Image: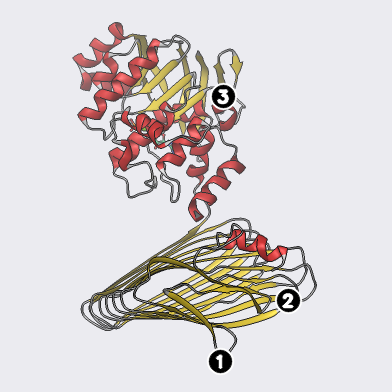
Amino acid sequence: MLQLNDIRWTTETGEKILNGIDLTVPDGKLTVITGPNGGGKTSLAKVIAGLYKPCGGQIIIDGNDVTDWSITERSKNGLAYAFQQPVRFKGLTVKDLLSISAERELSGAEVCHMLSEVGLCGRDYIDREADASLSGGESKRIEIATVLARKDAKLLVFDEPEAGIDLWSFTSLIEAFENIKKDSSRSLLIISHQERIMNIADYIAVVADGKVKTMGTRDEVFPSLMDKTSATRCSLRNS
Amino acid sequence: MNSITEQLLGVVSDWDGSYKGAFNIREDGGCAGRQSSENIKIEPKNDNPGIVIRISSAAQQETVYIPACVTKAGVNDLVYNDFIVEDGADVIIVAGCGVHSEGEEEARHNGIHRFFIGKNAKVVYKEKHIGTGNGKGSKRIDPVTDVEMDENSYMEMDTVQIGGVTSSNRLTSAKLGKGAKLVIKERLMTDGDETAKSDFKVEMNGDDSSIDLISRSVARGNSYQEFVSTINGNCRCTGHSECDAIISENGRVNAVPGLYAANIDASLIHEAAIGKIAGEQITKLCTLGLTEEEAERKIIDGFLK
Ligand SMILES: Nc1ncnc2c1ncn2[C@@H]1O[C@H](COP(=O)(O)OP(=O)(O)OP(=O)(O)O)[C@@H](O)[C@H]1O
Ligand SMILES: [Mg+2]
């Protein structure tokens, strides 16, 4: 379980991006964070994963206060995070990256299997460098695979996993999320603007202007989002 | 041969106690073993120290090993090797040089290699360099490579300098005939006070010839590297060079790429990037459980692989 208490984060230039986020992500559930562009979702994910140091508040994972832990320590304790913008590596192959994730040298067949979860035909990619020659959708799916490969991860955070992904791969991805959800010891936090992901959510939180504006079960929050998307945006901005 | 040579050979040229086929092992300026094969004949030179390697058209996918080792301080080895590759031959040449020193004086290997590559011949040339030992004297490797490529021939040069070489100065020049294709892959790592210079001069003289030069390097500590390339397109041809360098600590890299087009149908491209490891690459690997140091090592190992 992840618990965020009054999380605040300010940029180097002093701009306040996160203004007191309170949020609980329970085990065995899928929690979706949605909200307008620039609202602070990715910043929040980076604070959770340890990429950004908050200037206030606490991050509790499974009872441990991890606020001062390094990225590596959080990862070793079961936190996995798929970036919104995948990182490109000159020289590291897809197999190298997935082997680092899995903490052992994977066989070609294992890599193939992992890539099929994100709709990639493995054989064509195993020895490809994870560099800028990959298409947007390819590198995004490989990024997601690096997190799915973390079989030990207890809290999995995905930042807009739908971005740039074709319909067919998206269907396999939804299946992968549903399978993770079945494991009551793992929790899923997905930042998304996608209806199909919100449809399988247990909880939805709306983050805007660096605050949680709405939080509730899917059935409580989802209809209002669909109703008046544009109106919601305006009212969120003004509230 | 001595045990240091054996160790060096293991690292630089796939030695596992023996070589299959043709080989010539050079140790401290002398010959420590030589064997010709039916299609690859190795003979000593008359005028200069060194050998002539004749690869006949009948050689197809054959390998020849020609490593050189310097195993002690005070040795300054200079050797001239000529490779004559007949039309249509297909050969893998495993060169490689190890320099070991425990003394105060300099230990140096200077190999001057000339390649005459016949029509439609194919050559893959692999060369690894390493310096070992705790001697104060510098360990130097200064290879000079001259290549002449006839019609539709192909050559791939794969050079790696793994570490421990105090200074290296590599001069490579090539002249390409019609349809000839040259691929050069260089990987270089320097640390401490090491310096490494690579200077490539490629002249494309025959229509439809091409060069692809890819250099990846890492400069750490106080080391210094210089990359100079001059690609001349004198005909309808394509040239591409790419110099990618990672610097860390006080490492310095000077990249001076040159392109010279003397024909309207010459198409030449150069890409160069020098910088530290991108922070987001380290961060990503940390999110997968590596420490910053482990992440840096992985990235550099992969980059130079
Ligand atoms: N490192 C940073 N330095 C400066 N500003 C930043 C930094 N990171 C984020 N911001 C700013 O913080 C705000 C929130 O950005 P964030 O990426 O968290 O939004 P988001 O909710 O994920 O948006 P989107 O839906 O477009 O992905 C933006 O205005 C962004 O420009
Ligand atoms: Mg975002």
Residue B64 locus on image (x, y percent): 48, 69
Q: Is residue B275 visible?
A: yes
Looking at the image, residue A66 lies above or below residue B210: above
Give the spatial CA distance, label 2 vs label 3: 59 Å
Q: Residue furthest bottom?
A: B47
Q: Residue B294 lies in what quarter of the image?
A: top right
Task: Give the residue pinned by disc 2.
Answer: B106
Q: Is residue B203 left or right of residue B43?
A: left
Q: Residues within 10 Å of mark 2 (few under 14, many from 20)?
A: some
Give the residue type at disc 1. Answer: Asn
Tell me the element at label 2: loop
> Does the image show residue A193?
no
In the rendered image, residues at marks 1 and 2 fall on the same chain:
yes
Closest to the camera, between mark 2 and mark 3, is 2
Query: Which residue reaches farthest right?
Result: B104
At x 54%, y 50%, the residue is B301
Name the foreground residue: A191 vs B117.
B117
Q: Are marks 2 and 3 on the same chain?
A: no
Q: Secondary structure at mark 1?
A: loop
Three-letter amino acid code at the position of disc 2: Glu
- Of residues A181 and B100, which is closer to you in this image? B100
Q: Do badges 1 and 3 share one subunit?
A: no
